[in-house]
Image: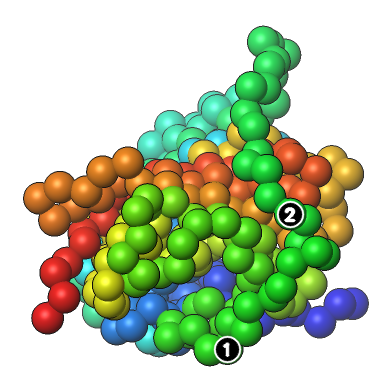
Amino acid sequence: MAEESSFDTDIAVTPIGEDRFTAALSDRWWVGGGPNGGYVAAIMLNAMDVVAGQAGPGQPPRSLTVHFLSAPSTGEAEVEVTVEKGGRNTSFLSARMLQEGEVQAKAMAVFSSDRDGLAFDNSEMPEVPPPDESQEFDTELAPVNVFARFRAIPAFGEAPFSSGSRAETAGWIRLKEDRPLTPELAAVTLDVWFPAPYVLLDGPTAAPTLEYTVHFPRRLPPEGLEEPDWMLIHLHAAEATEGHFTEDAELWSRDGTLIARSRQMALIRKRP
Protein backbone atom coordinates (compact mmCIF):
# COMPACT_ATOMS: atom_id res chain seq x y z
CA MET A 1 0.00 0.00 0.00
CA ALA A 2 1.34 3.46 -0.94
CA GLU A 3 2.32 5.70 1.93
CA GLU A 4 -0.22 8.42 2.66
CA SER A 5 1.02 11.84 1.57
CA SER A 6 1.19 14.75 3.96
CA PHE A 7 -1.46 16.54 1.86
CA ASP A 8 -3.87 13.65 2.44
CA THR A 9 -2.95 13.66 6.12
CA ASP A 10 -3.41 17.41 6.46
CA ILE A 11 -6.89 17.45 4.87
CA ALA A 12 -8.03 14.20 6.52
CA VAL A 13 -11.35 14.11 8.35
CA THR A 14 -12.37 11.57 10.99
CA PRO A 15 -16.05 10.72 11.59
CA ILE A 16 -17.27 11.45 15.13
CA GLY A 17 -21.01 11.11 14.59
CA GLU A 18 -23.65 11.35 11.93
CA ASP A 19 -22.23 13.71 9.27
CA ARG A 20 -19.78 15.18 11.79
CA PHE A 21 -16.01 15.05 11.50
CA THR A 22 -12.84 16.26 13.16
CA ALA A 23 -9.80 17.59 11.32
CA ALA A 24 -6.34 18.71 12.45
CA LEU A 25 -5.30 22.00 10.84
CA SER A 26 -1.58 22.11 10.10
CA ASP A 27 0.47 25.31 9.88
CA ARG A 28 2.25 23.80 6.86
CA TRP A 29 -0.60 25.43 4.91
CA TRP A 30 -0.48 28.81 6.67
CA VAL A 31 -0.42 32.33 5.20
CA GLY A 32 0.69 34.82 7.82
CA GLY A 33 -1.55 34.51 10.87
CA GLY A 34 -4.01 31.98 9.47
CA PRO A 35 -4.59 29.11 7.08
CA ASN A 36 -4.71 29.43 3.31
CA GLY A 37 -8.36 29.69 2.29
CA GLY A 38 -8.01 26.94 -0.29
CA TYR A 39 -6.71 24.63 2.45
CA VAL A 40 -9.78 25.28 4.61
CA ALA A 41 -11.97 24.75 1.54
CA ALA A 42 -10.24 21.42 0.82
CA ILE A 43 -10.89 20.11 4.34
CA MET A 44 -14.55 21.08 4.17
CA LEU A 45 -14.92 19.60 0.69
CA ASN A 46 -13.29 16.38 1.88
CA ALA A 47 -15.94 16.01 4.59
CA MET A 48 -18.74 16.91 2.19
CA ASP A 49 -17.39 14.38 -0.32
CA VAL A 50 -17.77 11.60 2.25
CA VAL A 51 -21.39 12.52 2.96
CA ALA A 52 -22.20 13.11 -0.72
CA GLY A 53 -20.92 9.63 -1.53
CA GLN A 54 -23.51 8.26 0.86
CA ALA A 55 -26.34 10.56 -0.26
CA GLY A 56 -25.79 10.21 -4.01
CA PRO A 57 -23.05 7.79 -5.12
CA GLY A 58 -21.32 8.73 -8.36
CA GLN A 59 -21.90 12.46 -8.01
CA PRO A 60 -18.63 14.44 -8.17
CA PRO A 61 -18.46 18.03 -6.90
CA ARG A 62 -19.29 20.66 -9.52
CA SER A 63 -19.32 23.82 -7.40
CA LEU A 64 -18.01 24.82 -3.98
CA THR A 65 -18.44 28.18 -2.23
CA VAL A 66 -16.85 29.00 1.12
CA HIS A 67 -17.36 32.08 3.29
CA PHE A 68 -14.58 32.73 5.81
CA LEU A 69 -15.99 34.18 9.01
CA SER A 70 -12.78 34.03 11.04
CA ALA A 71 -9.25 32.71 10.69
CA PRO A 72 -9.02 29.21 12.25
CA SER A 73 -6.04 28.36 14.41
CA THR A 74 -3.79 25.32 14.23
CA GLY A 75 -5.09 22.17 15.83
CA GLU A 76 -8.41 20.40 16.00
CA ALA A 77 -11.51 21.67 14.22
CA GLU A 78 -14.92 20.14 13.71
CA VAL A 79 -16.79 20.00 10.40
CA GLU A 80 -20.56 19.54 10.40
CA VAL A 81 -22.15 18.56 7.07
CA THR A 82 -25.83 18.82 6.13
CA VAL A 83 -27.50 17.28 3.10
CA GLU A 84 -29.79 20.15 2.14
CA LYS A 85 -31.30 18.10 -0.68
CA GLY A 86 -30.20 14.71 -1.92
CA GLY A 87 -31.21 13.37 -5.31
CA ARG A 88 -30.52 10.56 -7.75
CA ASN A 89 -28.45 12.86 -10.00
CA THR A 90 -27.83 16.06 -8.01
CA SER A 91 -27.28 16.76 -4.31
CA PHE A 92 -26.83 20.03 -2.41
CA LEU A 93 -24.75 20.00 0.75
CA SER A 94 -23.68 22.61 3.28
CA ALA A 95 -20.94 22.51 5.90
CA ARG A 96 -19.63 24.47 8.85
CA MET A 97 -16.14 24.45 10.35
CA LEU A 98 -16.03 25.13 14.08
CA GLN A 99 -13.36 25.58 16.73
CA GLU A 100 -14.34 25.75 20.40
CA GLY A 101 -17.97 26.13 19.36
CA GLU A 102 -17.32 29.17 17.14
CA VAL A 103 -18.07 28.97 13.40
CA GLN A 104 -14.93 29.74 11.40
CA ALA A 105 -16.18 29.01 7.87
CA LYS A 106 -19.40 28.04 6.09
CA ALA A 107 -19.62 26.23 2.75
CA MET A 108 -22.17 25.19 0.15
CA ALA A 109 -21.52 22.64 -2.60
CA VAL A 110 -23.28 21.03 -5.53
CA PHE A 111 -22.57 17.39 -6.40
CA SER A 112 -23.94 16.24 -9.75
CA SER A 113 -23.56 13.17 -11.97
CA ASP A 114 -22.62 13.14 -15.65
CA ARG A 115 -25.47 13.76 -18.11
CA ASP A 116 -26.01 13.56 -21.86
CA GLY A 117 -26.33 17.12 -23.16
CA LEU A 118 -24.85 20.00 -25.09
CA ALA A 119 -21.05 19.87 -25.17
CA PHE A 120 -18.72 22.64 -26.35
CA ASP A 121 -15.47 24.22 -25.23
CA ASN A 122 -14.44 27.77 -26.14
CA SER A 123 -11.91 28.07 -23.33
CA GLU A 124 -8.35 29.01 -24.29
CA MET A 125 -5.27 28.46 -22.20
CA PRO A 126 -2.82 31.38 -22.24
CA GLU A 127 0.17 30.86 -24.52
CA VAL A 128 3.24 30.39 -22.34
CA PRO A 129 6.54 28.49 -22.64
CA PRO A 130 6.24 24.86 -21.43
CA PRO A 131 7.53 24.17 -17.91
CA ASP A 132 10.47 22.12 -19.22
CA GLU A 133 11.84 25.23 -20.94
CA SER A 134 11.49 27.62 -17.99
CA GLN A 135 13.34 28.39 -14.76
CA GLU A 136 11.86 26.98 -11.55
CA PHE A 137 11.46 29.30 -8.55
CA ASP A 138 12.70 28.15 -5.13
CA THR A 139 9.44 28.21 -3.18
CA GLU A 140 11.31 27.66 0.09
CA LEU A 141 12.20 31.36 -0.18
CA ALA A 142 8.52 32.39 -0.15
CA PRO A 143 7.34 34.29 2.94
CA VAL A 144 4.29 32.01 3.43
CA ASN A 145 4.34 28.35 4.47
CA VAL A 146 1.74 27.12 1.99
CA PHE A 147 3.74 28.09 -1.11
CA ALA A 148 6.65 25.92 0.06
CA ARG A 149 4.40 22.85 -0.34
CA PHE A 150 4.49 23.41 -4.11
CA ARG A 151 6.93 23.75 -6.99
CA ALA A 152 6.49 26.85 -9.14
CA ILE A 153 7.65 28.32 -12.44
CA PRO A 154 6.66 31.92 -13.28
CA ALA A 155 5.14 32.08 -16.78
CA PHE A 156 4.14 35.71 -17.38
CA GLY A 157 3.18 38.89 -15.57
CA GLU A 158 5.20 41.30 -13.48
CA ALA A 159 6.60 40.42 -10.08
CA PRO A 160 4.61 40.96 -6.88
CA PHE A 161 5.13 44.36 -5.21
CA SER A 162 6.82 45.75 -8.32
CA SER A 163 4.42 48.70 -8.88
CA GLY A 164 3.40 46.97 -12.10
CA SER A 165 0.81 48.02 -14.63
CA ARG A 166 -1.69 45.14 -14.76
CA ALA A 167 -3.16 42.86 -12.08
CA GLU A 168 -2.50 39.63 -13.94
CA THR A 169 -0.08 36.76 -13.38
CA ALA A 170 0.44 33.13 -14.37
CA GLY A 171 2.76 30.27 -13.62
CA TRP A 172 3.27 26.54 -13.74
CA ILE A 173 2.61 24.85 -10.42
CA ARG A 174 2.50 21.37 -8.91
CA LEU A 175 2.45 19.82 -5.47
CA LYS A 176 5.89 18.65 -4.36
CA GLU A 177 4.36 15.27 -3.50
CA ASP A 178 3.42 13.06 -6.43
CA ARG A 179 -0.28 12.81 -5.80
CA PRO A 180 -3.24 12.32 -8.17
CA LEU A 181 -5.28 15.42 -8.91
CA THR A 182 -8.54 15.64 -6.93
CA PRO A 183 -11.08 18.42 -6.40
CA GLU A 184 -9.55 19.04 -2.98
CA LEU A 185 -6.08 19.52 -4.45
CA ALA A 186 -7.48 21.77 -7.20
CA ALA A 187 -9.22 23.92 -4.57
CA VAL A 188 -5.92 24.47 -2.76
CA THR A 189 -3.85 25.00 -5.90
CA LEU A 190 -6.16 27.72 -7.22
CA ASP A 191 -5.55 29.73 -4.05
CA VAL A 192 -1.79 29.28 -3.61
CA TRP A 193 -0.30 31.75 -6.12
CA PHE A 194 0.08 35.35 -4.93
CA PRO A 195 -3.01 37.54 -5.53
CA ALA A 196 -2.95 39.31 -8.89
CA PRO A 197 -3.35 42.83 -7.36
CA TYR A 198 0.00 42.37 -5.59
CA VAL A 199 1.62 43.20 -8.94
CA LEU A 200 0.36 46.79 -8.60
CA LEU A 201 1.69 47.37 -5.07
CA ASP A 202 5.12 48.57 -3.98
CA GLY A 203 5.28 46.42 -0.82
CA PRO A 204 3.62 43.57 1.09
CA THR A 205 0.13 43.87 2.51
CA ALA A 206 -2.62 41.50 3.67
CA ALA A 207 -5.36 40.29 1.33
CA PRO A 208 -7.68 38.02 3.36
CA THR A 209 -10.36 36.18 1.40
CA LEU A 210 -14.00 36.72 2.33
CA GLU A 211 -15.62 34.39 -0.19
CA TYR A 212 -14.12 31.71 -2.44
CA THR A 213 -15.94 29.79 -5.18
CA VAL A 214 -14.52 26.94 -7.24
CA HIS A 215 -16.16 25.36 -10.30
CA PHE A 216 -15.17 21.88 -11.47
CA PRO A 217 -16.24 21.50 -15.13
CA ARG A 218 -15.20 17.83 -15.30
CA ARG A 219 -14.40 14.87 -13.08
CA LEU A 220 -10.90 14.93 -11.62
CA PRO A 221 -8.47 13.71 -12.60
CA PRO A 222 -9.52 14.05 -16.26
CA GLU A 223 -9.20 10.91 -18.34
CA GLY A 224 -5.65 10.55 -19.62
CA LEU A 225 -4.29 12.97 -16.99
CA GLU A 226 -4.12 10.63 -14.03
CA GLU A 227 -0.37 11.06 -13.48
CA PRO A 228 0.85 14.09 -11.45
CA ASP A 229 2.17 16.86 -13.70
CA TRP A 230 2.64 20.60 -13.97
CA MET A 231 -0.52 22.73 -14.19
CA LEU A 232 -0.79 26.32 -15.36
CA ILE A 233 -2.50 28.76 -13.02
CA HIS A 234 -3.70 32.08 -14.48
CA LEU A 235 -5.02 34.85 -12.22
CA HIS A 236 -6.40 38.27 -13.07
CA ALA A 237 -8.32 40.99 -11.25
CA ALA A 238 -10.26 43.61 -13.22
CA GLU A 239 -10.90 46.03 -10.37
CA ALA A 240 -10.33 46.93 -6.74
CA THR A 241 -12.52 49.47 -4.99
CA GLU A 242 -13.55 50.41 -1.45
CA GLY A 243 -10.91 48.07 -0.03
CA HIS A 244 -12.17 44.96 -1.88
CA PHE A 245 -11.21 43.16 -5.07
CA THR A 246 -12.54 40.25 -7.13
CA GLU A 247 -10.05 37.83 -8.66
CA ASP A 248 -10.65 35.15 -11.29
CA ALA A 249 -8.36 32.15 -11.63
CA GLU A 250 -8.08 29.20 -13.99
CA LEU A 251 -6.17 25.96 -13.64
CA TRP A 252 -5.05 24.21 -16.84
CA SER A 253 -3.35 20.93 -17.62
CA ARG A 254 -0.23 20.92 -19.76
CA ASP A 255 -2.29 19.85 -22.81
CA GLY A 256 -4.75 22.76 -22.46
CA THR A 257 -7.57 21.04 -20.58
CA LEU A 258 -9.41 23.37 -18.20
CA ILE A 259 -9.22 21.61 -14.84
CA ALA A 260 -11.06 24.10 -12.61
CA ARG A 261 -11.75 27.78 -12.25
CA SER A 262 -12.36 30.03 -9.25
CA ARG A 263 -13.50 33.47 -8.23
CA GLN A 264 -12.91 35.11 -4.90
CA MET A 265 -13.78 38.33 -3.13
CA ALA A 266 -11.01 39.54 -0.85
CA LEU A 267 -9.91 42.58 1.11
CA ILE A 268 -6.92 44.58 -0.05
CA ARG A 269 -5.60 46.52 2.92
CA LYS A 270 -3.41 49.57 2.90
CA ARG A 271 0.15 49.04 4.04
CA PRO A 272 0.90 50.04 7.67
The quarter of the displayed image where residue 127 is located: top right
Residue receiving disc 1: 140
- Secondary structure beneath disc 1? helix
- Counting residues from the start of the chain, the first of labels 1 and 2 encountered is 2
Quadrant containing the N terminus is: bottom right
Q: Residue furthest top?
A: 118
- Residue at image x 19%, y 52%? 244
Is 181 left, or right, of 228 in this rendering?
Answer: left
Frontmost of labels 1 and 2 is: 2
Numbered marks: total: 2
- Residue type at mark 1? Glu
Residue 113, how many percent across, how many down?
65, 29
Any part of residue 99 in sight: no
Q: In the picture shown, does residue 193 fall above or below 237?
A: below
Residue receiving disc 2: 129
- Mark 1: few/some/many CA within 10 Å (<14, 14-19, 20+): some
- Residue type at mark 2? Pro
Residue 173, how many percent across, how many down?
65, 64
Is 71 left, or right, of 237 in this rendering?
Answer: left
Q: In the picture shown, does residue 8 fall above or below 87?
A: below
The quarter of the displayed image where residue 59 is located: top right
- Residue at image x 58%, y 82%? 139
